[in-house]
Image (spheres, grey):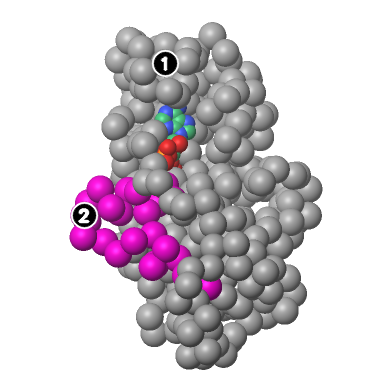
Amino acid sequence: VARERASLRVSAGRDDHGAGRQSDRRTSVPNSAGVASSTRGTHLDCASRLQSHQRAPSTLHAVRNDTPSSPVGALKFGNKKLPNAIIVGVKKGGTRAVLEFIRIHPDVRAAGTETHFFDRNYDRGLEWYRGLMPRTLESQITMEKTPSYFVTKETPHRISAMSQNTKLIVVVRDPVTRAISDYTQTLSKTPDLPSFQELAFRNQCLGIVDTSWNAIRIGLYALHLENWLRYFPLAQIHFVSGERLITDPAGELARVQDFLGLKRIVTDKHFYFNRTKGFPCLKKPESSGSPRCLGKSKGRTHVQIDRDAIEQLRDFYRPYNVKFYEMVGHDFRWE
Ligand SMILES: Nc1ncnc2c1ncn2[C@@H]1O[C@H](COP(=O)(O)OS(=O)(=O)O)[C@@H](OP(=O)(O)O)[C@H]1O
């Protein structure tokens, strides 16, 4: 893992819905485990491709978070405040579900749309960012979610410059399933996209994964987390299991509420399992008061990927996953 980590440079990539590559700095990670596993999926032409293949070299200011915008308005409507807690990732992990579930708590208010302040809109300044936030009373927490933050190099530093006390939430999901989910989303918008395998592998016969493809790169959680730990202590980052969020939303939300220092008000009473949707839905969301599931873009049927490719990706991600489990002190059991 150390060798592979050293050969990888994680940097901000454009969030182009998973199809983008960092073409200016393509790195390949020859995966020793993947070479063995790749033989399971070897096609007849792999031998010739093996010969011809050449392995590429592995290669502000601090601002107070509590500036009241209007003491008079605060009496009636509250003030817009910079967020106390941010769901920073990961894309397709279940970030919308966590935000929609936690915001039914009376002490939480959240920006509805992804602000992309710390990655795309930083030049607009913190006052612009604050303007996007809902009004809150003193006792309420302000939240937002932008999943691309987790993989954007500049973001941890920028958030710590806003406030070192910001609480961070990361919804993590098996990186292989996450990549397929990401690809499925891109395909729904770009039907002539190359196949998943073409994008995921530089050479599938050799099991060489293309880490310059965002859909792959995002799943290297251990590498991204290293960058966050330069600016925030681990205790200030809470990891939600994207898998358990589906099987036990109340359990995951209990831990989120504990982490945010909130009373456990969102409980199993708020959820029901919708068989048609195949996911937990809210009995009584914040806005309407009637039952509601997440939209059609959440819980899509995934594109079918052949088992060999999935095995190769599992082999590829395994050391990174193990490293991630060690770093966070929790085994997410992505097997
Ligand atoms: N309750 C509930 N309802 C619907 N979907 C749920 C729910 N809980 C978790 N999920 C999973 O959330 C996945 C989408 O993740 P994100 O919201 O982070 O996606 S995004 O990055 O904002 O596009 C989405 O991924 P796909 O299944 O691949 O569509 C879901 O698996």
Q: Residue at x 60, y 31 (%)?
A: 244
- Answer few, some or many: residues within 10 Å of disc 2's Cα (few below 14, many 20 plus, some between 14 and 19): few
Callout 2–callout 1 Cβ contact below 8 Å: no
- Magenta residues, as a range? 180-205
Q: In the rendered view, would you say 82 is above or below 57? A: above
Closer to the camera, 295 or 108? 295
Label of residue 106 in the image = none
Residue at the farthest front position: 44
Element type where label 1 sits in the image: loop
Task: State which quadrant residue 288 falls in.
Answer: top left
Question: Residue under circle 2?
Answer: 191
Q: Residue at x 51, y 58 (%)?
A: 309
Closer to the camera, 266 or 69? 266
Amino acid type at circle 1 is: Arg
Q: Residue at x 35, y 28 (%)?
A: 294
Query: What is the number of callouts on the image?
Result: 2
Q: Quadrant of the N terminus?
A: bottom right
Q: Is residue 250 visible?
A: yes
Closer to the camera, 97 or 139? 97
Residue 145 horizontal/vertical position (percent) = 43, 44
Q: Residue at x 54, y 9 (%)?
A: 269
Name the side, left or right, on which 267 lies relative to 272. right
Amino acid type at circle 2 is: Pro
Q: CA distance from mark 2 to mark 1?
A: 29 Å
Q: Is residue 109 visible?
A: no
Q: Residue 187 in magenta?
A: yes
Element type where label 2 sits in the image: loop
Residue 82 horizontal/vertical position (percent) = 44, 46
Residue 200 horizontal/vertical position (percent) = 45, 65
Label of residue 275 in the image = 1
